[in-house]
Image: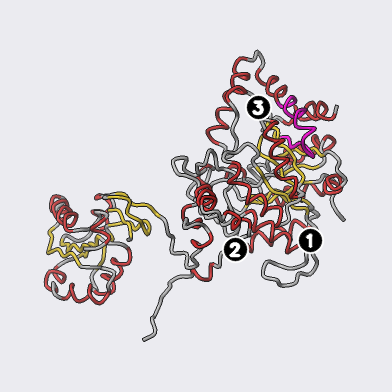
Amino acid sequence: MPSHFAHKLAADEFVITAEIAPPKGCDPAGLMRTAISLAPFVDAINITDNQGANMRMTPLVAAGMLVREGIEPIMQLTCRDRNRLALQSDLLGAAAMGVKNVLALTGDDIGCGDHRQGRAVFDLDSVLLLQTIGALNSGFDLNGAPLAGATDFLAGAAAAPEVEPFDATRPKLVKKAAAGARFFQTQAVFNPERLAYFHDAVQPLGVKVIAGILVLKSARMAEFINLNIPGLKVPLPVIERLATAADPAAEGVRIAIELALQCRSICSGIHVMAMGRYEVVPQLIAAIRS
Amino acid sequence: MIVSTQKPLEQIVAALEGGSRVFIIGCAKCATVCKSGGEEEVFRMQDALTLAGKEITGTIVIDETCHMLRTARDLRSRREQVEEADFLLVLSCGAGIQSVAEAAEKKVVAGTDSKFLGNIRRFGQFEQRCSLCGDCRLNDSGGVCPVTVCAKGLLNGPCGGMEEGCCEVDRNNRCAWVTIYERLTGQERVRQLDAITPARDFALKRHPNSLKLEK
């Protein structure tokens, strides 16, 4: 049976997702509290996978715990920390736990995280991971051996609408679609015109676009993101707006709402990256849904 | 060529702990070009170790230390100096160091770290372009190796960390996939990139590898 999230995407209904990082530790209480508080407002919750190459609880278990709680996760899965055996066995495990949505990612460089001496794997890349999910969905492993039971994942991929040179990223977007991606969750959007251009460019591929909206807290945080988080680029005017605001945290929410409202008519959904400020998500989503 | 760099002197001296007589071996090929173990570096090492209180029983710069039979033969030609030594200090790539270890019963000390198979940009500048992956893909990627030049070794296009054509891992480097895209676009064969490149076959990269030519 397809997921609620898959069903809404297929029915061309607007979707809203948010993301949570699993804990840096073995106590899932905080993760579950956050997930339960967000669940009434979103269609699915992304569970990040050692994001920024910082070691945390495996998204497989975190996503499985959400399912048990009746909350629909989108399990993020990167190629950085697992070879093709580990990726497949984690996917089978996720399916067994009732996880239905997977976001297939390459993974940030291990050198930007908290285990810089570690060995990055990259046995597969995101396109090949999508193909792998497709194979498991058809009841076979990557080498064509039959499985006892097929998985039923809805697979998605990442995309960067504002990256330059955009054209150099096009062939990979085509390949992601061909390999089975049914939705793109984008990097943070700051220029809705670029999102519209991106949307037009990928529309022939039949992949739904879910625009990433970043909730900023301060100019300093934006500068930190620009320096340390691959693929995220907060433009200067936004940083200036935060720097001159009387209440930068509230200004960050206002910026996110403005962007989300502009993106709403362009794409199939919004993905909220709250950067830990989960308490503002309901307000943001209420504004988007208004 | 194999690019190597010399280990810091204090590490070399520490590895020579427990013996005072040292025979130094350099290599006339790669280690000479990257100045980790040529004639000049062997000479300087001799001076430095003498200052550190070691006695140098002799030195030799072998033409291709990786050549096992030649290395064994050249060491035999210096049998006395080799026999006198407590340690054989080798300033060549890891392959050469192991030729020496196989040719002599003496304790061998590696004086270098082998870094990569390097192209020479100009004198003293080396760049990694090939990782000896065993399954060359340059025909599909406009002559730019994604396995090596992409920091993540991605086969199907740039990762999400590419910015303004630069690599996520080192912003001073151009993204390999942007270079590939531009080159194939210029050659009017960019459609090649629409086909998914299958996963690498790491069975081709198992080690220790060997090759024996048919006679």
Compared across the picture, whether B90 is left or right of B162 comes to left
> SS class of the residue under badge 2?
loop
Amino acid type of the residue tagged 1 in the rendering: Thr
Whole-percent x, y for residue A43 in the image = 82, 41
Q: Give the range drawn in magenta.
A: A256-272
> SS class of the residue under badge 3?
loop
Compared across the picture, whether A278 is left or right of B30 comes to right
Amino acid type of the residue tagged 2 in the rendering: Ala
Name the residue at 46% across, 43% down.
B170
Whole-percent x, y for residue A113 in the image = 54, 43
Whole-Å distance between the Cαs marked 3 and 1? 37 Å
Circle 1 marks a residue in which chain? A
Between B165 and A269, the one nearer to me in the picture = B165
Residue pointed to by mark 2: B199
Whole-percent x, y for residue A89 in the image = 69, 62
Name the residue at 19% across, 76% down.
B73
Label 1 Cα neighbours within 10 Å, binned few <14 / some 14-19 / many ≥20: many
> SS class of the residue under badge 1?
loop
Residue pointed to by mark 3: A216
Whole-Å distance between the Cαs marked 1 and 2? 21 Å
Residues behind callouts 2 and 3 on a single chain = no
Residue pointed to by mark 1: A151
Mark 1 vs mark 2, foreground winner is: 2
Could one spot residue A33 in this view of the protein?
no
Name the residue at 70% across, 33% down.
A213
Which of the two labelled residues, at mark 3 and mark 1, occupies the earlier sequence position? 1
Say which quadrant the C terminus of chain B sits in: bottom left
Amino acid type of the residue tagged 3 in the rendering: Leu
